[in-house]
Amino acid sequence: MDLTLRLSQQPEADELLSRSPLAAMIGMLLDQQVPMEWAFAGPYTIARRMGGDDLDAHEIAARDPEEFAALLSEKPAVHRYPGSMAKRVQQLCQYLVEHYDGDASAVWRDVSTGRELLSRLNDLPGYGKQKSQIFLALLGKRLGVTPEGWREAAGSYGDKDAYRSAADITGPESLDKVRAHKQEMKRAAKTAKATKATPKK
């Protein structure tokens, strides 16, 4: 299995995502309200601005909140909402320090079932059900983390040969397919909302 992630479409950033569980976890956290490539390039940008080539949960958790927010806000900003996302990243790292001694991979290292892993991911600050299922699918499809029942626990994101999320991206072509799927889902949701809002005669 090729364990190289290609989510940011930037070689250096993708290399960090591929070797650093914490970077991948933070990238997934940032993946909201911005293009996917922007979100997953974020961990690499944070690492560089912190003066290293990797991320350390203990170091991030201990940073002064205002200082860390300023670090994410530098141009180009790590996210459209760097202040609020800086807070979420620190909350995530603080949780990892408290529950997993700062080791992101410990979240999945000893799990025996996909359901158990999904439960652990759901407990992470900033991870709702959908984000947890997508990250679970990413772990299974791209990083070789395949506890029993992981596809079922990931829901539709665990489907083979699908193009629904970050878990299905292997390069520019699949990225375009995932983006097209997301746009179609948004259109469908908008249509459904408009239909629901139309008064019945």
Image (cartoon, grey):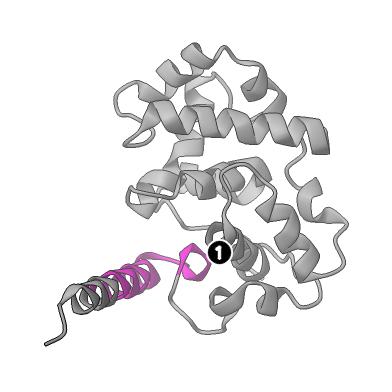
| Residue 110 higher or lower than 153, as above or below | above
Seen at 54% across and 18% down, the residue is: 51
**Is 22 left, or right, of 33 in this rendering?**
right
Residue positioned most to the left: 201
Q: In the rendering, at what x and y percent does residue 96 appear? A: 73, 36
* Quarter-of-image position of residue 94: top right
Identify which residue is drawn at 39% across, 33% down. Answer: 78
Q: Is residue 168 magenta?
A: yes
Percent across and percent down for residue 11 are: 45, 48
Q: Residue 12 in the image: x percent, y percent?
A: 48, 42
Which quarter of the figure is the C terminus placed in? bottom left
Given residues 11 and 103, the one toward you in this image is 103
Res 118 → quadrant: bottom right
Using the rendered view, name the quadrant where residue 143 is placed.
bottom right
Residue at point 63% right, 36% down?
92
Q: Residue visible at 15% across and 77% down?
A: 198
Quadrant in the picture for the N terminus: bottom right
Residue 45's x, y, as percent?
45, 31
Q: Is residue 54 visible?
A: no
111 sits to left or right of 63: right
Residue denoted by label 1: 134
Magenta range is 165-187
> As shown in the figure, which amino acid type bears the numbered disc 1?
Ile
Left of 183 or right of it: where is 58? right
The main secondary structure of the magenta stretch is: helix
Exactly how many numbered labels are in the figure? Answer: 1
Q: Secondary structure at mark 1?
A: helix
Q: Residues within 10 Å of mark 1 (few under 14, many from 20)?
A: many
